[in-house]
Amino acid sequence: VYKQKLDFPVPVARVLMMDVEARAGVYPQQAIESLQSLAAESNVPDDMPPLINSLMAQLLEGVEREKVSRAGEEAALQSQIVLVGSSLPAGGCVVEPRVSILTNKRIRGSAVVLEDGCSYISQAEAASWSRVNPFSPLNTGRRILPP
């Protein structure tokens, strides 16, 4: 195309825009920078600036939303209760591992047996649950005692 001095059938700015759209989901910050440099170019077709601005607005909004969600996750991790020994393997539950009814994950460490005798939650979950709700997660009306 370039050797024969033929016009490329699609403006290069449109190809760059498609490339930015493809990378935006994985690398939003780099996509924003590429859009800013693309908007500053003088050979951009007349119909492209509104598309560039709308995509940049979407990416900036997504980046801000991600910052807020990361801050919320960090705050949740800071308030999480981790008891001593809660990450150690449970010794006697090899054949039928105990699964938490709150998270549906295998319980590592010691478990709290609930009032029905066959439901379990981890000690850390019991401590966290009792901080916000004094009653059992089975909705039986019984109180759960913190470990």
Image (cartoon, rainbow, N blue to C red):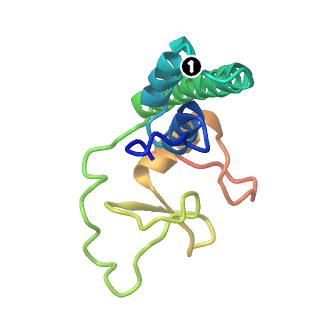
Residue on which the image places disc 1? 43
Q: Which residue is situated farthest in the bottom direction here?
A: 95
- Amino acid type for the residue under numbered disc 1: Asn
Q: Which residue is situated farthest in the front direction here?
A: 4
Closer to the camera, 72 or 15?
A: 15
Q: Is residue 97 above or below residue 39?
A: below
Mark 1 is surrounded, within 10 Å at the Cα level, by few (under 14), some (14 to 19) or many (20 or more) other residues, namely few
| 130 with respect to 106 (left or right) | right
Residue at 50% x, 49% y: name it: 126
Closer to the camera, 105 or 13?
A: 13
Q: Return the x and y of residue 71 as percentages of the image width and height.
A: 49, 24
Closer to the camera, 51 or 31?
A: 51
Q: Return the x and y of residue 95 as percentages of the image width and height.
A: 35, 87
Is label 1 in a helix, a strand or a loop? loop
Residue 146 visible to an observer of this rendering: no
State the image quarter where residue 64 is shown.
top right
Residue at 54% x, 58% y: name it: 103
Residue at 41% x, 42% y: name it: 2
Residue at 45% x, 47% y: name it: 1
Q: How many marks?
A: 1
Q: Return the x and y of residue 28 as percentages of the image width and height.
A: 49, 32
Residue 108 visible to an observer of this rendering: yes
| 140 with respect to 83 (left or right) | right
Closer to the camera, 84 or 62?
A: 62
Q: Is residue 14 above or below residue 122?
A: above
State the image quarter where residue 30 is shown.
top left
